[in-house]
Image (spheres, rainbow, N blue to C red):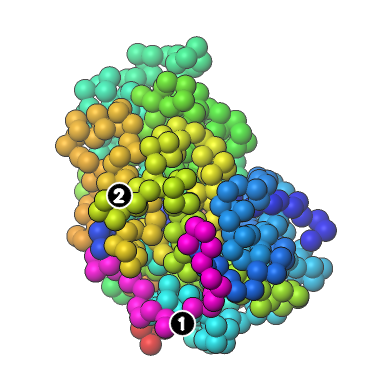
């Protein structure tokens, strides 16, 4: 990889995936159990002093991995990284594009210069078309016992398509999808809620009124001008803080740019939905009255996160994986009342939020092994080991005695020091390595329980509640809730998605739908932003122009094609 920056470790982005999880406190309570366990294990070495087995062959090797989501460099020297190397012989050297360059993978294909492994997300089809990554199903069958154990009857969902039923990738998101955190929804400062006596905030109009009243009362916070609503719309996060939040406010399940009727399989480009228009029109209004940060579509990520960490932003819409460092900075500065409460806010009260709907396990877009790699077998053995129980416990919990203990009831518990550090130290993951090597590797997910009766992940209703600050607990208590997800419809009241999530569909990269997706995404980001920043009296005309342009791009044909992909996915998964 000559043109990519090299880093020594994978940055943990709890992505987009955090918002895709469902509830349950045991295996039967989750919609996706792991099926039948494999009867063998790849590792055959004797346990070490910490009780780990690892791989029988620990010959030192450096494996390169291109990770599309990685945005910063971190050394592979934390305690978990060292233990991984000790147990497998593998040192990870993770490559990433500079500045989120979308041309990185096309450039690889053009040059034929690939790493050992690659996490390409939506560009996976391009690698398949180029013959750049290898099918894994034979290796899984022959020696992938940990992967078979982890995925169980979900292996079918790892297959690429009906036309090409090969398995090219593993990992990315958890098989189990419990929901204990509300992530990627509209948020408001706890201080605002307390100051106003914890009012009902259920609609965007009520949200606006709360922000306006507080900003009028406190025009400055910590010596800086108060900001009402702040978004990050200058890069790919436009999809996260603008597009995805519009879906949630419109009562649309997170299917990326699509609104899908799960009963019929009918798909519609979500910007055709009147409630999405109403949300964007509201943003235009917010901008006009000075409640939307005017830099929401121009500032860079460092400026955005610095604003969040300053405590002067009253409202945001960024997932925890994007704002956790800012939250920890606020707590460390003694400003925990400036942290955010995640509420169920929709365009109007008649809309039922689909946030808590169980997406099920969607399968694809994980890590692939490149055809050009000279370390294919080692790379596969490493990925299979990452799916093992000991790797799952290590990457989630760390080392027994150092990071966690086992109490008299046999339950794993983070040490008091780790609990405190996890909440307060923005560099917790970087320093400890705990949680760093989950995404995009194979993972059991929240809610999955191991043979000892413990959750594989450190998340549980009790643990999530225990990590709340005193301010968060006070806010929740005032509303009669224990968790932020309690503001939303109970997961069991909504049906499990039959198709997973459409943004993970394997769409042929050279087909009409892929072309429409690319053209429309670029157009929507630019045109909707312009409409939001324009005059409110011009918004309807601007939106009509957007709809006309989408029609000219072939949106109706795209709807038909996405509908067919949805129906095919449902049929394929149940074959």
Circle 2 crowding by C-alpha within 10 Å: few under 14, some 14–19, many from 20:
few
Q: Which residue is painted at 79% across and 71% down in the image? A: 112
Q: Which residue is painted at 60% across and 53% down in the image? A: 81
Closest to the camera, between mark 1 and mark 2, is 2
Residue at the disc numbered 1: 40
Q: In this view, does 131 lie to the left or right of 482?
A: right
Let me know if residue 163 appears in the view. yes
Residue 42 in the magenta stretch? The answer is yes
Residue 170 circle label: none
Res 104 → quadrant: bottom right
Read off the magenta span.
27-51
Local secondary structure at mark 2: loop
Residue at the disc numbered 2: 407
- Percent across and percent down for residue 63 are 70, 64
- Percent across and percent down for residue 350 are 21, 48
Q: Which of marks 1 and 2 is nearer the N terminus?
A: 1
Vertical position of residue 422 compared to residue 527: above or below: above
């Amino acid at each position: 990889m000559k043109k990519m920056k090299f880093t020594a470790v994978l940055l943990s982005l709890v992505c987009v995936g955090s918002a895709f999880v469902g509830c349950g406190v045991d295996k039967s309570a989750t919609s996706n159990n792991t099926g039948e366990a494999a009867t063998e294990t790849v590792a055959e070495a004797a346990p070490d002093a910490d009780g780990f087995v690892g791989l029988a062959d620990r010959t030192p090797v450096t494996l390169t991995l291109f990770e599309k989501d990685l945005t910063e460099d971190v050394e592979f020297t934390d305690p978990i990284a060292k233990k991984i190397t000790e147990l497998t012989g593998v040192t990870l050297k993770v490559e990433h594009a500079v500045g989120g360059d979308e041309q990185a993978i096309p450039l690889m294909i053009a040059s034929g210069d690939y790493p050992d492994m690659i996490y390409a997300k939506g560009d996976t089809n391009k690698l398949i078309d180029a013959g750049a990554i290898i099918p894994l199903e034979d290796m899984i069958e022959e020696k992938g016992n940990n992967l078979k154990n982890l995925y169980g009857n979900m292996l079918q969902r790892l297959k690429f398509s009906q036309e090409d039923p090969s398995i090219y990738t593993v990992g990315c998101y958890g098989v189990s999808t419990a929901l204990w955190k509300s992530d990627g929804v509209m948020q408001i400062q706890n201080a605002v809620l307390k100051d106003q006596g914890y009012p009902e905030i259920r609609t965007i109009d009520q949200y606006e009124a709360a922000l306006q009243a507080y900003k009028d009362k406190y025009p400055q916070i910590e010596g800086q001008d108060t900001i009402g609503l702040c978004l990050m719309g200058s890069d790919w996060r436009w999809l996260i803080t603008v597009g995805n939040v519009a879906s949630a406010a419109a009562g649309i399940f997170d299917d990326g740019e699509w609104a899908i009727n799960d009963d019929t399989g009918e798909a519609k480009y979500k910007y055709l939905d009147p409630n999405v228009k109403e949300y964007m029109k509201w943003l235009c209004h917010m901008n006009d009255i000075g409640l939307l940060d005017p830099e929401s579509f121009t500032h860079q990520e460092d400026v955005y996160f610095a604003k969040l960490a300053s405590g002067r932003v009253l409202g945001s819409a960024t997932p925890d994986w994007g704002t956790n460092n800012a939250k920890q900075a606020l707590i460390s500065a003694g400003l925990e009342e400036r942290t955010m409460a995640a509420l169920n806010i929709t365009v109007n009260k008649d809309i039922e939020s689909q946030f808590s709907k169980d997406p099920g396990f969607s399968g694809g877009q994980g890590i692939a092994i490149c055809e050009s790699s000279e370390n294919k077998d080692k790379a596969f053995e490493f990925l299979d080991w990452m799916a093992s129980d000991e790797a799952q416990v290590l990457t989630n919990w760390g080392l027994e005695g150092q990071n966690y203990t086992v109490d008299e009831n046999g339950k794993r518990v983070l040490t008091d020091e780790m609990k405190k550090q996890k909440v307060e130290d923005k560099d917790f993951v970087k320093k400890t390595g705990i949680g760093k090597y989950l995404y995009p590797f194979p993972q059991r997910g929240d809610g999955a329980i191991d043979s000892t009766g413990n959750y594989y992940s450190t998340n549980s209703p009790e643990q999530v509640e225990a990590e709340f600050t005193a301010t968060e607990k006070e806010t929740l208590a005032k509303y009669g809730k224990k968790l932020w997800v309690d503001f939303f419809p109970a997961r069991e009241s909504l049906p499990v998605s039959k198709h997973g999530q459409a943004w993970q569909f394997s769409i042929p990269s050279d087909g009409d739908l892929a072309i429409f997706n690319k053209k429309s995404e670029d157009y929507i980001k630019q045109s909707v932003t312009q409409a939001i920043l324009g005059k409110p009296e011009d918004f309807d005309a601007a939106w009509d122009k957007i709809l006309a342009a989408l029609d000219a791009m072939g949106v109706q044909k795209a709807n038909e094609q996405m509908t067919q992909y949805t129906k095919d996915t449902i049929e394929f998964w149940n074959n």
